[in-house]
Amino acid sequence: MTQFQVGRLVGYSASAISRIERGQMRVDLHARLSLAHALGIPPERVSGFPVPVGPVIDTVADVPVPDEEDAMRRRTVLTGALAAGTAAVVGTDTAATVPPVPLEDVLFRLPSGEPAPLQALATRTAAAREAFTAARYTRLGAALPDLLAAAEATRDAAAGRARQQASAILARAYVLTAELAAKEHSDAAWVAADRALAAARTSGMPVPIGEASRVLAITMRRSGRSAAAVRLLTHEAGGLDPAEARTGAVRTSLLLTAAYSAAAGRDRTTALALLDEAEEDVARRPDAPGGLFTVEATRAQVDGYRISVHNALGTPDEAVNVARGLNVGLMPTAERRARAWTDTARMWHALGDGTQAFAALRHVEQEAAQEVRRPALRALTSNLLYGPTRQPGLREFAVRTGAVPA
């Protein structure tokens, strides 16, 4: 079998299979079991212990993992988000009524899909994007499996220009999948980001390529490869016209993500230079909201990233004036507003001001109730709760958001 044929069976690109074979790409137990199933290898040879016979999607849930606490931390929101319950179908975000499906299983075993008209598929993808930007992750997770299956089927059945357009839509669906996975630091983000970039390059369109490159760089940064993420992002940004509204907006988002990636690697000079470059790009053209999945190319977004960059650099005191001057209400999506308040909460927490940190967390809850229940936010809430200063209402908040048991 070729690398392409193996990849098609398990949902990886040929290049990803090549990296796995060369030992350059780490895969988790779910991926190893999927590869074993596809290649007819006894599952115990890749897991190290007996695994019940049957399809991988039916057995993975019964396989113990080395660190159950870490697995729970990474999957709590994602498994809830991917439960395709009746409530999610009708547009609410209450708990699903059927057992949740792990994201990794969805990616490796998409449901069967039928080709759809491009306009209808684009409309569904736009609705999925709206769910993400509104921080309705349960609704997004319920929609993603069928959306991905339909987009894959449409791309495979198309030819010529229609195939390019279908590939662009498929790339954007996988970008959303990677964004959702990244919310929980799930290894599934690697798979989704790799597929997004492969589909985007097939489309040949600079905007999807930029969007997919951004989510791939985020997964690289989260795995400790900050310098490589910066190189990828700056390379892609260098090929985009900063004066053109659509490509310029993508360029700005790439620069902002590169700045944060550099800060995560403690490269202060590069991080601040990239922030300044993004700010110059925004000043040269009108704000361009609506074109990207999570980052709007506006001055408010640059300021929001400046706060997160200083947090990552360990210099939160340098972000105080930025935070005080930031009008979070100018950010057009709930997800971005919640992100800005999250970074502000982290800034105040690092500075030892629990009162203002808790006030910022309350804003996160007001903007996006599902966002404040993410493990990172629950950990911050727990730190405040057990800190030296007693905050009125904090314990109730901690119970309500799942940071501590009721």
Image (tube, helix red, strand yellow):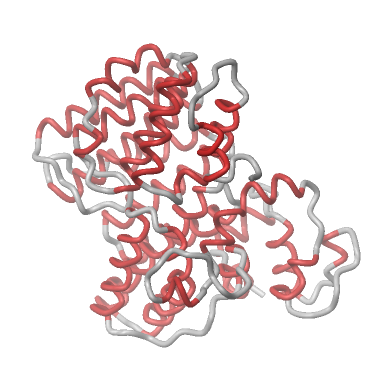
The residue at the point 47 percent across, 55 percent down is 180
Task: Determine whether, in the image, residue 50 is placed left or right of residue 254.
Answer: right
Quadrant assignment, res 259: top left
The residue at the point 23 percent across, 41 percent down is 331
Q: Furthest-front residue in view? A: 392
Q: Specify the quadrant that holds the C terminus.
A: top right
Q: Is residue 375 above or below residue 277?
A: below
The residue at the point 53 percent across, 45 percent down is 400
Q: Is residue 23 above or below residue 357?
A: below
| Whole-percent x, y for residue 276 in the image | 25, 23
Task: Determine whether, in the image, residue 384 is placed left or right of residue 203.
Answer: right
Q: Is residue 305 above or below residue 24?
A: above
Q: 367 or 206: which is nearer to us?
A: 367
Task: Determine whether, in the image, residue 351 is placed left or right of residue 404.
Answer: left
| Whole-percent x, y for residue 288 in the image | 15, 46
Q: Specify the quadrant that holds the N terminus.
A: bottom right
| Whole-percent x, y for residue 297 in the image | 22, 41
| Whole-percent x, y for residue 164 in the image | 30, 71
The residue at the point 57 percent across, 70 percent down is 106
| Number of numbered discs on residues | 0
